[in-house]
Image (cartoon, coloured by chain):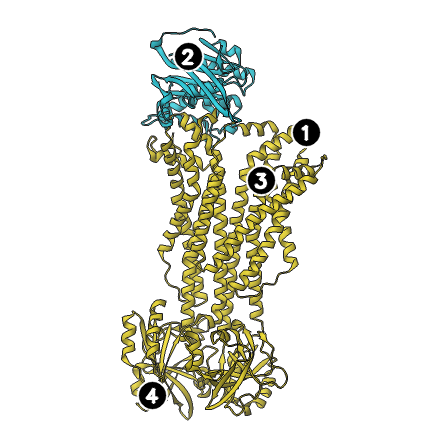
Amino acid sequence: MIDNHKTMENSVLQANQVFKSIEHAGSDLDILRDISMDIAAGSTVSMTGPSGSGKTTLLGILAGLDLPSSGSIMLLGQTISTMDEDERAKLRNGRVGFVFQSFHLLPNLTALENISLALEVIPGSQDIKEKSVQSLESVGLSDRASHLPSQLSGGEQQRVALARSMVVNPAILFADEPTGNLDHQTSMQIVDLMFSLVEQRGSTLVLATHDHQLAERCDVQYRIEAGQLV
Amino acid sequence: MSSIGLKPGSWFSQTGMGFARSLRLGEFRLLLLACLFVAIALSVVGALGSRIEQAMQFRTSAILGADAILASTRPLNQEYWGLAEELGLETADSISFMSMLTNGQESRLVNVRAVSGNYPLRGEILIKSDTSPEGYVEYRHPPDQGAVWAATQAVVDLGLDEQGTLQIGDMQTDFVGEILLDPEGGVDRIRFAPRVIMNMDDLESTGLLTPASRARYRLLVAGDREAIEAFDEAVRPRLESYEEMVVADIRRDEVNSTVGRIISYIRLAVLLSVILSVVAMALAAQGLWRRQVVEMALLRCLGQQNRKTMFRLGLRYLAAGVPVCALGGLIGFAIQDVAGRIVQEQVIMRLPEPSLWSLTNAGFITLIALFVVTLPTLRAVQQVPSVILLRASSSPPMTQQKSTFSVLLLIVALTIFLAGDIVLALTVLPGLLLAALLFWGVTRLLIYVVGRMVGTRTSPYYVALKEVCSNGARSAWITSTFGAIVFALVLLAVFRYDIFESWGQTLPDDSPNVFAINIKQSNIAPLGEFLDGQKISRSDMYSIIRTRIVEINGRPVSEYNFTGEAKDRVGHVFNLTETADLPQDNEVVEGQWFQGAERGLSVEDETASELELELGDTLTLDTAGVRHTAPVLNLREVVWENMRPNFFIIATPGLLEGAPVSHMLAVHVDGDINRFINQMSREFPNISAINVSILLQRFQEIVNQGSMAISTLFVFTLLAAGLVFFGILQGQKITRQLQIALLKSMGASRSFIRKAVISEFALLGIFSGLLGSAMALLTGMLMADQIFEMELVVSWSWMAISIVAGIALVSIAGYLSIRGLLRVVPVQLLANNRG
């Protein structure tokens, strides 16, 4: 692990002695063991490790999509590990963005509508269309606004997903293997775009990847092996 | 952004957007289409079914001119009018008597009926008209004061033209119309003198009716079935020996028997359509749920709380469901309104006004159905794990089991609601469930057996076989559902064919269209010559003896506690015939038809059942004061709708020797019927002839309309089945996509895949066709006996056609569903699958 901690005052995400185990074949299987980390606002953080090391599980827990078996998580100043699902969702609302390996664009929504969806779930959202168009422009796909995901290439789909995550100006962006389904050249374009957008908006980036080159572009790099930070 | 131009942010606009966006999903459109089908079917059956049933009652009542008649040989007690009024019944009255009608030098004994202004309460009087296209005009009132209508017989005998002046008693009156058909002018009524109808207000002027006159006084009542029954119950105990109560009886109406079958068929078709549409709804809801899982997880990721997601989804269903259900209700309402108008115009059935309640009812029930099929998915929203977005291996909550259970409950409830008649519900529902369970079990067994026999070969047919065997559960599910569809379609097709067939048998081209009565023994020989001269090829002559049952097994009938129809049967004089030949369309169901010199009676089976008669029981008949006792030798089933003379009781020739006898003739006339009747009346003045061609024509019209309704409904059910097919295949599309992509990536040609897929569906089609048609034929035989009261002829050709149709249907549908995927390159299929 390369420690580049910024001060606790700027912290947006803290994990304290996080364990995660699941029941498997009648016994407990440890996925994560004693993970602690502190992520500063505006920083870019990578988590690397081999397949099955637990990096995606950790990302899910840090984002509040899943709960740890023990330990605590503090996201944006609130302890989410004691919150119920709705409270965690409320906390994420408009402040947390996601980029997934499989993009997860809704197939029946156009590119623009997929982006709008992120704003539509925020109570009292204004100028949804304008903001969505701007976000689509920011990823260079303004001419693809009315296209359905099936009419877009993999790289274009991931750019739309990126625009969806950034349209709310998230305080923190979680990205799970964002280039995992893309070729090298497209991956580089997406990564450049992602870092540039994160920097422009002052967001924090938490990235799970097995790509060392990508991880090295981050301010902070964590390495996970067999569920432990090394 | 809003696709429908609404201000974003509000629930309203979000619901609108969600609805508009969901419409792009095939599963959502299928759900709404299935919903529309359910609403249409419910609305049609809800409104038209009950309207036609009420109309059937009206039609039967039209024969009487009322729902019930209280008749007496003495003036009726005013209490009866009071009772009818108390029960809210409409009343009319008539008085009939015999009198001479005179036109100049010509006189004729006629049956005069003086009727009140609102006569008849049901049905119409048909008056001949050369100017109207139908050849007649209908009246629901008597002629004006100072005018009369007279039946054809009187018109011919008195040499009346279209208009003329007549004398009845002290009154001079104008002849203004020739009666073609009037209440109580049905084919089963014997009338010895032609009818003349006059206005009650003229009765006094004739001076004919005195306290000593022999007249028949009638009180006609009409109203709700319950009120009629209450009137009947209240009046019967008070009846004097000279009074008689007659209530319209649907069962003995030949037209209603046919209409009854049509209604049973309509109900069956609608029931099957609704069941299939509900299954399609459930399939669509499941498919939609698989699509929505990602959306639900994503919305949670984006920070939307579960209850809001549920609310959002629920509102989306509601926003889609309400207009669709309303539209379905309206379409159904329009269909039944048009159908109702046709029935009203063509069949001359007075239909009650369509009720808006049936429309809202249909819409509301469909909305409940939509709620029931989507509820499991709404409840599952909170169980969708958000990590599904991070890990493809995370499984979304399964809703099939809960959904299957709720859909089954829904189908049970709808079946009971729709069937109205519990026999239909209890036959179709277990039939369908049993069929599905049986299909499931048998298919799994077949797959297991075949699977153990399959080796490894490089052929598309083996790939297909492997595919069926390695996906046992999926194959069994497809077979069960397709089998149930084949079951429904074969069931409807069989009955459609059989109903048409039975009508064909019922109404041959040489059906009698003229009935002649009051024929004396001395008329028989010259009448035969007359018929030969008229080139009448076919005629049936029956003796008519008026008799009454007075004892059963030596005990007076008054000692038996008969009620209802049985009481009517033993209380009244009826027509009996003596013949050695079994009449056409009669079938001996117990015992043997008269053999050699034996002496006894043949009784219609339902009459025997009402009177609890068995073979060997004796009946004592009183014929003009002379008693004859004879055993029941056999029981007959009678096809009442064959439009031929039919008899409750037939005696062996000579059994009632010495009894006054007249004869009845039924002939088919090809040419001008009125000319034939006129000539017969001139040559045989004592014979009364009745033209029943109008009745036949109306009967044929009903059959034609019924055929049209049945064909339309069959197509409707076929479309509902198509929805289910589409639902199943749509649900499989993602798996198929992956399977085809893998086969293609491994080098399989398009033709190899095509053959494999078609073979796979053909194999499932064999299972479905075989099981579905076998089950349909079994259920069909049960229903034919219990509901349609007809014999279903099961042929092997039907079985073969069903199986071939099943294979073709399933194979074609299966191929069509993947045809588009065959042309796409594998990488695109895999990419789509990923999205």
Q: Residue B747's mark?
A: 1
Asked if the residue at tag 1 contacts the one at tag 3, i.e. Cβ–Cβ closer than 8 Å, the answer is no
- Indicate the chain on which mark 3 is placed: B
**Which residue is labeled 4 in the image?**
B172
| Distance Cα–Cα, label 2 vs label 3 | 47 Å
Tell me the amino acid under the disc marked 2: Met
Q: CA distance from mark 3 to mark 4?
A: 88 Å
Q: Which residue is mark 3?
A: B473
Q: How many residues crowd mark 4 within 10 Å: few (<14), some (14–19), many (20+)?
A: some
For mark 1, give the secondary structure: loop
Q: Which residue is mark 2?
A: A37
**Rendered-image quadrant of the N terminus of chain B:** top left
Whole-number angstrom distance, CA of label 3 to CA of label 1: 28 Å
Residue B625 placement (x, y as % from top left): 45, 91
* Pointer 3 or 4: first along the chain: 4
Spot the yellow chain and give its letter.
B
Asked whether the residues under marks 1 and 2 belong to the same chain, the reply is no
Extreme residue toward the front, this view: A26
* Left or right of B40 in this view: B817: right
Residue at the spot 64% in from the left edge and 28% down from the top edge: B745
Tags 4 and 1 touching, CB below 8 Å: no
Position of B826 relative to B342 (above/below): above
Label 3 sits on what residue type? Ala
**SS label for mark 2:** strand
Q: Position of residue B398 (x, y in %)?
A: 48, 36
The earlier-in-sequence mark between 4 and 1 is: 4
Of B260 and B340, the residue lying toward us: B260
> What is the display colour for chain A?
cyan
Asked whether, in this view, residue B751 is left or right of residue B270, the answer is right
